[in-house]
Amino acid sequence: MSQSVGALASAQAFEVLGAVMAKKQQDQQAAMANMLVQSAMQGVEQTAAAQPVGNIGQNINVTV
């Protein structure tokens, strides 16, 4: 009887350990995804902040 109780407790402990490790993995993936989005947004902000120089390409004459 004591062995089955010990085995059950051990199995439950491993299940909790697995859940904790999965949670840590998800947190780590979320942090990396946030860093990726932030770096992409910085690139977009820098691109949007760039102003065109002169008027080259702003006026296009099309004749058919």
Image (spheres, rainbow, N blue to C red):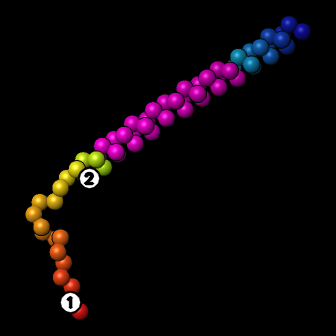
Please check the rendered image and state whether residue 7 is part of the magenta-colored stretch, yes or no: no
Residue in the image at 70% along x and 23% along y: 15
Query: Quadrant of the rendered structure where residue 17 is?
Result: top right
- Asked whether, in this view, residue 3 is left or right of residue 29, the answer is right
Tell me residue 53's x, y (percent).
11, 60
- Asked whether, in this view, residue 44 is left or right of residue 5, the answer is left
Residue in the image at 59% along x and 25% along y: 21
Mark 1 Cα shell of 10 Å, populated few (<14), some (14-19), many (≥20):
few
Q: Which residues are magenta?
A: 15-43
In this rendering, is residue 55 above or below 35? below
Label at residue 48: 2
Q: Residue furthest left?
A: 54
Tell me residue 48's x, y (percent).
26, 52
In this rendering, is residue 41 above or below 62? above
Please check the rendered image and state whether residue 33 is part of the magenta-colored stretch, yes or no: yes
User: Which callout, 1 or 2, points at the residue further toward the start of the chain?
Assistant: 2
As helix, strand or loop, the secondary structure at mark 1 comes to loop
Label at residue 53: none
As helix, strand or loop, the secondary structure at mark 2 comes to helix
Residue in the image at 65% along x and 25% along y: 19
Disc 2 marks a residue whose amino acid type is: Ala
Disc 1 marks a residue whose amino acid type is: Thr
Q: Nearer the viewer, residue 29 or 55?
A: 55
Reading the image, the residue beneath label 1 is 63
Query: Quadrant of the rendered structure where residue 59 is?
Result: bottom left
Q: Quadrant of the C terminus?
A: bottom left
Q: Residue furthest right?
A: 1
